[in-house]
Amino acid sequence: MNRVDPKKLLLSKWTAVTPVDKEKHFLVARVPLPEPPGAALEWVEIEAVHSKRGRLMRWRDLQDSTLWRRGWV
């Protein structure tokens, strides 16, 4: 399990264990603020390094070490 602090997610680097659309390296590009303010953070936007294609995902999915590795491996 990857230990992830939601306050340090922005601009963190991640490697997909299984490539997603032939893309392996990602960067957390945006951490949308939850609605209403004070609610728990649930989503992040990751961006593929090569294609700059972005997608929303639950930030807790990054903790699953069978799917994601911290850093660019």
Image (cartoon, grey):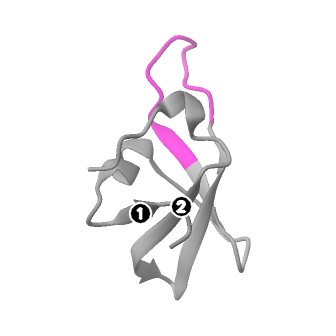
Q: Which residues are magenta?
A: 32-44
Q: Is residue 10 left or right of residue 17?
A: right
Q: Is residue 13 left or right of residue 1?
A: right
- At 59% from the left and 66% from the top, the residue drawn is 26
Q: Nearer the viewer, residue 15 or 42?
A: 15
Spatial CA distance of label 2 from label 1 is 6 Å
**Residue 49's quadrant in the figure?**
bottom right
Tag 1: Cα neighbours inside 10 Å, few (<14), some, or many (≥20)? some
**Residue 25's quadrant in the figure?**
bottom right
Residue 42: give x, y in percent of width and height: 44, 35
Tag 2: Cα neighbours inside 10 Å, few (<14), some, or many (≥20)? few
- At 61% from the left and 50% from the top, the residue drawn is 12
Say above or below: 27 vs 42: below
Residue 15: give x, y in percent of width and height: 49, 69
The amino acid pointed to by label 2 is: Gly
- At 44% from the left and 44% from the top, the residue drawn is 59
Tell which residue pokes out farthest to the bottom in this image: 22
The amino acid pointed to by label 1 is: Arg
Say above or below: 18 vs 27: below
Element at label 1: strand
Q: Nearer the viewer, residue 49 or 39?
A: 49
**Pointer 2 residue:** 71
Say above or below: 56 vs 41: below
Q: Is residue 67 magenta?
A: no
Element at label 2: loop
Q: Nearer the viewer, residue 69 or 6?
A: 69
Residue 73: give x, y in percent of width and height: 50, 73
Dominant secondary-structure state across the stretch colored magenta: loop
* Marks 2 and 1 close (CB-CB < 8 Å): yes
- At 34% from the left and 49% from the top, the residue drawn is 2
**Pointer 1 residue:** 69
